[in-house]
Amino acid sequence: MATIRVGTRGSALAMTQTTTVAERVSELAGSSYELVRVRTEGDVLKGSLSQIGGTGVFVAALRDAVLEERCDLAVHSLKDLPTLPADGLTVAAVPEREDVRDALCARDGLTLATLPDGARVGTGSPRRAAQLRAARPGIEVVDIRGNVDTRLGRVAGLVIGAPGDLDGVVLAAAGLRRLGREEAITELVDPAVMLPAPGQGALAVECREGGTAPGVREALASYDHAPTRLAVTAERAVLRRLEAGCSAPIGALAHLRGDELALEAVVCSLDGRSILRLTRSAPAADADAAAQLGHALADELLAAGAAAIAPLTS
């Protein structure tokens, strides 16, 4: 079988995630693999995610590389994927999810509760920023960009020789774990306090529709983790129904409880002063049922005034 070409961004986290996926898929397919680095707009442009076009800027070039047959697969952080599918592509596998929670990495072992008033906490996510402001109105939230190590370097005393101009930063626990940076975590934030982004902690393996070798298709089908796919399908359906972009101040988290899929979602104002949080459950029959659950919960949020609370236009 021909070598499987797997597209990836060039960051340390992307390379780590993609290598893990490529190794497993190649093992299941009985084939070798090579990584194809692709530079995306999100790697080049500066400024906040809302200014440069939302997290979709991290995937467009990778998708083009697959469509143009420069690679066979692309690996994405699922929370970076726009909710609308791309013509000619399909998400062929969603591997088992990592930790869904957000993680506080703070100086001196501080937690969200013990950060002093006036503490400066960095994040590039409007969702995290809004929930931080809601949980701790006395802290200052600072908009930051950069890879994981750059962000950790902003925390006072955490990285020798780094700026250290912040008291803490909030990052996805999954990324820190994949990079072996767990020691930087001072608190795994309870989803009751900070609901994660739809799809957080999960990866997506995208390929051309009908354009993948049979052995690879079978490997991807085997690699797909049904409970994770059901959960993220419901979460992303909330975003899609709300017509919100990936960087909107919206969180969603689903999990299986026996035969039921339980879904919780939150819509926040950017200043954290208004928060609408609802839950709903339904039988977890298949992906269509999961999507219908997400749509139904989104409709409840809209009926409760979500559009007046948060900027929901993609």
Image: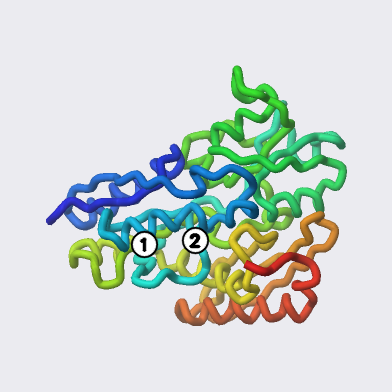
Quick check: marks 2 and 1 in contact, CB under 8 Å?
Answer: yes
What is the x, y in percent for residue 139?
82, 41
In this view, which residue lies farthest toward the top?
161
Q: Is residue 197 left or right of residue 288?
A: right
Amino acid type, callout 1: Glu
97 and 127: which one is in front? 127
Give percent across and percent down for residue 34. 24, 45
* Residue at figure coordinates x 75%, y 67% from the top left: 277
- 120 above or below 24? above
User: How far apart are the alpha carbons under marks 2 and 1?
Assistant: 10 Å
- Judge left or right: residue 194 versus residue 272: left
Q: Secondary structure at mark 2?
A: loop
Q: Position of residue 291 (x, y in %)?
A: 53, 77
Q: Badge 2, how many Cα within 10 Å: few under 14, some, many 20+?
A: many
Q: Tell me what residue is drawn at x 34 percent, y 44 percent.
A: 37
Which quadrant holds the N terminus? bottom left
Badge count: 2
Of mark 2 and mark 1, the one earlier in the sequence is 2
Judge whether 158 appears above or below 100 on screen. Answer: above
Q: Quadrant of the C terminus?
A: bottom right
Q: Which residue is mark 1?
A: 206
Rendered image quadrant of residue 121 = top right
Query: For the point 63% across and 64% down, which residue is it?
Result: 252
Q: Position of residue 197 (x, y in %)?
A: 61, 58
Q: How is the image coloured?
A: rainbow
Q: Amino acid at mark 2?
A: Leu
Quick one: 111 or 124, which is closer to the camera?
A: 124
Q: Residue at x 60, y 23 (%)?
A: 159
Q: Which residue is mark 2?
A: 81
**In terms of secondary structure, where does tag 1 sit?**
strand
